[in-house]
Image (cartoon, rainbow, N blue to C red):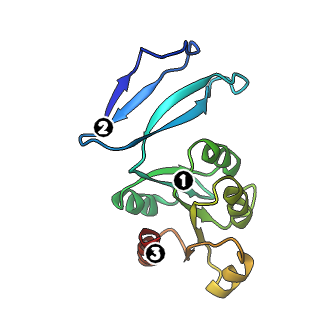
Amino acid sequence: MKLVLDTHSPKPLPERSLRFEFRSPEPAPFERKTCVNEDDPKMRDEVNLLTDVGTSKALVLVKESGSAASLIQRLAEAGFVVNASSDPTQSLEECRLNKPDLAVVDEDLQTMSGIHFIFDLLKVSWTTATIIVSKRVDEAIHEATEGLGILGRIKDYEDLESLESLLKKFEEM
């Protein structure tokens, strides 16, 4: 992808804001998104971003940074743009601006449960498919997440076989 700085903005942008256009080698449909200047959350100046619609986005929310390298690599190989985080609050705010298509969430997060995070995420983006990482058996997870419509469970970040079957289900949706 090529990064192009657009200096011909229709309205003046805040001093520290930039407008970017991402171009892929072949023409792709684009969707206009709006985000807030991240340098100063109190500034509500809007910055237009052109985002590739054809790219699937995945959020991986883990308890400890760096613990899900193989899972992240597999999602990237499957064509996802992956955003990995260990901060549920920050991830939820990011999801408000840039909704993921898929979220893989550890059941045991540092500041809240993964099930609680999924509940909050679905309030922001009800179309996001979710996978939970849990050592509990499927029946216990099904009971705990009833009504949330999760795609399924993987037992840990190395359970790539279960991940593959869930990714197939995701593609069929």
Q: Quadrant of residue 12?
A: top right
Residue occupied by mark 1: 100
Residue occupied by mark 2: 1
Percent from the top left, x then y, of residue 16? 56, 16
Q: Secondary structure at mark 3?
A: helix
Q: Are marks 1 and 3 in contact (CB under 8 Å)?
A: no
Percent from the top left, x then y, of residue 44? 68, 24
Q: Quadrant of residue 13?
A: top right
Q: Quadrant of residue 123?
A: bottom right
- Left or right: where 43 falls relative to 17: right
Percent from the top left, x then y, of residue 2? 30, 32
Q: CA distance from mark 1 to mark 2?
A: 20 Å
Residue occupied by mark 3: 169
Nearer-the-camera pick, 157 or 36: 36
The amino acid beneath tag 3 is Lys
Residue 35 higher or lower than 151, as above or below? above
Question: At x 30% / y 37%, what residue is drawn?
Answer: 1
Question: At x 74% / y 63%, what residue is drawn?
Answer: 116
- Left or right: where 15 falls relative to 31: right
The amino acid beneath tag 1 is Pro
Q: Secondary structure at mark 1?
A: loop
The amino acid beneath tag 2 is Met
Q: Are marks 1 and 2 in contact (CB under 8 Å)?
A: no
Question: At x 71% / y 74%, what residue is drawn?
Answer: 147
Q: Earlier in the sequence, mark 1 or mark 2?
A: 2
Q: Earlier in the sequence, mark 1 or mark 3?
A: 1
Nearer-the-camera pick, 112 or 97: 97
Residue 138 higher or lower than 47, as above or below? below
Q: Earlier in the sequence, mark 3 or mark 2?
A: 2
Crowding at dot 2, Cα within 10 Å, few <14 / some 14-19 / many 20+, comes out as few
